[in-house]
Amino acid sequence: MVGRNDPCPCGSGKKYKKCCLKKDEEARRAQVEAERAVRQAAAASLPPPLPAVQHLPPAAGTDDALGDGPETEAEADAITDSSFFDTRWAEFEAAENDEDQIAIFLATLDEGAMDNESAFEMLNVIYQASVASGERDRFDALLALLRQRQPDVYAHDAHFYAGWLISNALAAGRMDALPALAHELADTAGEDLDTVSGTLDQLAYHGHLSVVTEAMRRACPLVRDAGEYFEWAVTAFAERALTYARLDYLERTAAPHAAELEALSAAFDCAILQPGDAAQFLAHITGQAERRWTLDDFTLTPHRRRKGAPGLSADDGRTNLYYLTVEFLGYLRRAEGVPYAKGEIARDQIQRYILKRHAGELNDANGRREARPKARASAPVHPLCPDHDTMDRFLARLLSFLSSQPYRAAALFEMLPAWLRFLEARELIDADQRVRTLRELDGLVPDLIKVLHGYRSDSALRLAAEHWGENDGLRPARRDQAAK
């Protein structure tokens, strides 16, 4: 059981009592209320439905579109009575179609009766329906009306609303809308970092490096000064922000200089970089380091942190692994045309996967280290190549219900064939090892497709999994297996 002062299981970096405790308690209360409602339903029917209303006003933003709301305090008090919301929500749930649900939402808004919870719950249902029907623009108009009519209600869940608007803009190809929406999202990071980080992952996955960089630069001081997060969470966010700032600089600069790269650190005072300095980072990502790696360079020892630097390790194997993955990021950009932002997600997750596997954290489905070293799972066939079982567990944790990170899971798995091609080019594996590993990992694809299919707001995740391995000759083999 999670204690009040334990780190929240959702991965936000907050203490449980500062993050999901209230939400979990509300969920338990809601379950009790739902069970009571079921019992009462047999004895009482729903009230008559509301009169039909216009689904969308003729001109969004006009005061006449939705009326003036309640005229007296008494009317407002009556509207905010809990029984009113219970009745209205019951009617919303009982609506026969999407049109009726939108009508109920607009009627509630027109009456000035919308509260934070009702707005979010109704819009969450309407959003999923709009994704399925392709009416995303109509949903955006509903959000605009909520923001105009009841800005305080909108602001309460602005981190969710900005995320939905960003998803819709990406789906519609309205890239010009992304900077302003990302700024709106960033302004909520002081209290809702987990949700904000997920949407930043989405923007990075789709290659919008400059948008992500500016949003994280804007969010960093809010996260630092919020007082809501553990120190490691603040540091990790700043490190990620600085990495994106460096990559954005490299993307825009024909002849980058280490001194200019280093100067970017001033804007991210909480960041503690990976081992080394800007000059080494620049040499490795541009392919100019010219180091000939051997497997002995990646011998990992138990993790020892340097004094005063919680994110760093004195282990040369970890340092070398970091720079190998930095070289991989440069290879992805130059040789395979993968945007830096998306490649960085994959680079980071590959490094994390290898370190966690070495530490024994992927030995079983619960992530427990074995009590005795001799009881640990057998060593992987190759220290740099993923294997089926531990990759399956790593992906499962990225896609877990409490802290789902679908863009990190998708980017990681999508780039594994490229990682293996890179290792072969650096003579760290041979062609036979690459092919064996790909065939082993191919067994993860069907289940991954099923999971990613659930993220209907962004079909790019599922499509990437469906086309996995096509460039490596695995797609025909998978079809053959399906036929059998």
Image: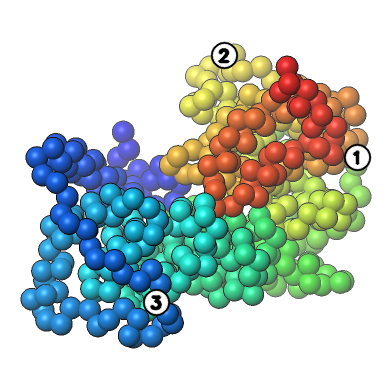
- Front residue of this view, candidates 345 and 70: 70
Say which amino acid is labelled 1: Ala
**Residue 40 percent across, percent down from the top left:** 12, 40
Whether residue 288 is visible to the viewer of this picture, yes or no, is yes
Quick one: label 3 or label 1, which is nearer the N terminus?
3
Residue displayed at 55% across by 63% down: 168
- Front residue of this view, candidates 435 and 43: 43
**Residue 126 percent across, percent down from the top left:** 41, 57
Relative to 388, is 423 above or below? below
- Circle 2 packing at 10 Å, graded few (<14), some (14-19), many (20+), is few
Q: Secondary structure at mark 1?
A: helix
Say which amino acid is labelled 3: Pro
- Front residue of this view, candidates 91 and 239: 91
Q: Secondary structure at mark 3?
A: loop
Residue displayed at 17% across by 50% down: 46
- The residue beneath circle 1 is 425
Q: Is residue 478 left or right of residue 106?
A: right
Tell me if label 1 and label 2 are in contact, CB under 8 Å: no
Which residue in the rendered view is the most extreme toward the bottom? 63
Q: Please state, as top left, top right, bottom left or bottom right, where the N terminus lies in the image.
A: top left
Viewer-nearest of labels 3 and 2?
3
**Residue 301 percent across, percent down from the top left:** 66, 32
- The residue beneath circle 3 is 57
Quick one: label 3 or label 2, which is nearer the N terminus?
3
Residue displayed at 61% across by 34% down: 448
- The residue beneath circle 2 is 375
Distance (Cα) linking label 3 and label 2: 67 Å
**Residue 24 percent across, percent down from the top left:** 29, 45
Say which amino acid is labelled 2: Ala
